[in-house]
């Protein structure tokens, strides 16, 4: 009997992240050229730093003079649209290329109850939209878009003393519960983002309550683990044990983390040990171990590997192949940001894995802080060209566009 290489070795050619033809098949020549031009600009650190600071200042003053330019360039690259309806084309385009969408209303840093309630209503609209769109299985939300940082930190430190403060926290709980209940009723899942350590214990508490309430029979609520923290691999395992004891599915979205410098500086100023891993290698080690742990317990953990790290994605793909697990199992997922790491997303999709793009949306003014972070993230990559740009250039060469 003749066996193919793939039958003999289930991990052989599981996925090829170097295939730029597949990675950029969804882009026309014109779109590829525009993306190349944009990433070249974002590789100029001085331009991103100066322009980003200026853009945030303009945003804070309500000046929208440059918003049309932003919408035609960086917004178009990293956002689905200014509204749910405006994002439909991007969602459809992703679905046609085997990729799902995670809707993320781009609000953050709210401070007033009316802002929190408005964001909640936007999230509820997204759930309703997702319930009728097979290309959108998940929405994402930040608790700081639904609650003040002061109240979240106050609950964590036990400093909510007044009736008004405790009432404010009760309203936070009610908003989070309303969000998760709507998701449960509509057959949609919710990613709850991780945030800074000084409010994360509060978020942990809120999310665990929601998982115990809504994850009994299916995955609805996902917790987020930032593996650049020294304690989060142990937290993942402890939370899994707790979920098993209480009889619910643990939702685990894995990320490396987003607040490293901020965390280290606060620890230095306040004189406590930094919660952040000492080296990138330490973070990579814990992240990859978390992936292995979740795949090993895939029946009781719903995993979303939300990483732009090629090795971490390959590890999960290979484990799924080695174990002979269904590549489209609802508990085995991958996710990257819209406009980034297309070589990972679309090659995973082509290989039959569950993969999605985070699709932020909202008015330019609302999502501008998010956009500037994306630009700064790309400009911080060392070398003359970032990984993103080098792959785009490779595809342009393949197409004979240079």
Image: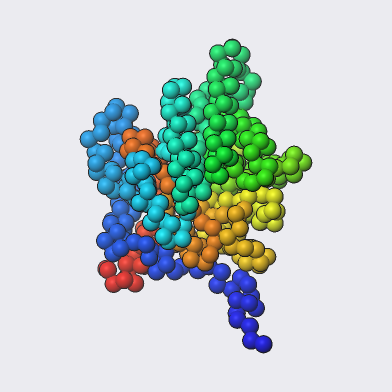
Along the horizontal axis of the image, is 30 left or right of 383?
Answer: left
Name the residue: 44% across, 69% down.
Answer: 19
Q: Residue at the left extreme?
A: 65
Task: Look at the picture and state if 377 lies above or below 37.
Answer: above
Q: Is residue 44 visible?
A: no
For the question of whether residue 97 can be seen, the reply is yes
The location of residue 42, given as percent across then percent down, is 33, 50
Quarter of the image for residue 112 reads: top left
Q: Quadrant of the C terminus?
A: bottom left
In the rendering, at what x and y percent does residue 237 appear? 71, 45
Give the side of residue 365 with respect to residue 302, left or right. left
In the picture shown, does residue 124 fall above or below 149? below
Residue 116 vertical position relative to residue 332 in the rendered view, above or below:
above
Q: What residue lies at 36% left-to-right and 35% top-to-bottom?
A: 366
In which quadrant of the rendered view does residue 198 lie? top right
Quadrant of residue 183 within the rendered picture: top right
How far from the left and from the top, in percent, is residue 382?
42, 54
Q: What residue do we see at 29% from left, 44% from top?
A: 71
- Residue 331 appears left or right of 246: left
- Quarter of the figure that contains the N terminus: bottom right
* Colour setting: rainbow
345 left or right of 323? left
């Amino acid at each position: 009997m003749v066996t193919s290489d793939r039958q003999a070795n289930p991990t052989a050619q599981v996925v090829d992240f170097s295939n730029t033809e597949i990675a950029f098949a969804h882009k026309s020549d014109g779109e590829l050229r525009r993306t190349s031009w944009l990433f070249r600009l974002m590789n100029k650190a001085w331009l991103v730093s100066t322009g980003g600071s200026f853009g945030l200042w303009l945003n804070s003053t309500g000046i929208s003079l440059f918003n049309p330019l932003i919408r035609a360039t960086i917004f178009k690259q990293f956002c689905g649209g200014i509204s749910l309806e405006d994002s439909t084309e991007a969602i459809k385009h992703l679905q046609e290329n085997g990729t799902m969408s995670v809707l993320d209303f781009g609000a953050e840093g709210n401070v007033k109850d009316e802002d929190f309630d408005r964001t909640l209503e936007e999230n509820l609209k997204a759930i309703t939209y997702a319930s009728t769109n097979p290309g959108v299985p998940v929405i994402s939300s930040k608790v700081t878009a639904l609650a003040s940082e002061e109240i979240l930190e106050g609950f964590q430190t036990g400093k909510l003393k007044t009736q008004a403060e405790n009432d404010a926290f009760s309203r936070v709980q009610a908003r989070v519960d309303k969000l998760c209940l709507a998701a449960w009723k509509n057959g949609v899942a919710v990613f709850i983002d991780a945030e800074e350590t000084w409010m994360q214990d509060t978020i942990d508490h809120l999310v665990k309550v929601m998982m115990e309430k809504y994850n009994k029979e299916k995955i609805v609520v996902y917790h987020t683990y930032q593996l650049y923290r020294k304690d989060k691999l142990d937290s993942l395992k402890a939370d899994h044990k707790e979920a098993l004891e209480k009889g619910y599915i643990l939702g685990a979205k894995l990320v490396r983390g987003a607040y490293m410098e901020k965390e280290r500086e606060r620890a230095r100023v306040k004189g406590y040990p930094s919660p952040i891993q000492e080296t990138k290698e330490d973070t990579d080690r814990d992240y990859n171990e978390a992936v292995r742990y979740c795949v090993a317990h895939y029946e009781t953990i719903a995993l979303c590997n939300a990483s732009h790290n090629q090795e971490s994605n390959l590890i999960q793909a290979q484990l799924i192949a080695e174990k002979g697990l269904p590549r489209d199992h609802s508990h085995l997922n991958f996710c990257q940001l819209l406009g980034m790491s297309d070589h990972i997303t679309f090659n995973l999709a082509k290989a039959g894995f569950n993969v999605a793009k985070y699709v932020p949306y909202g008015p330019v003014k609302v999502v501008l802080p998010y956009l500037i972070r994306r630009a700064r993230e790309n400009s911080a990559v060392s070398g003359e060209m970032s990984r993103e740009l080098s792959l785009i250039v490779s595809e342009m060469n393949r197409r004979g566009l240079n």
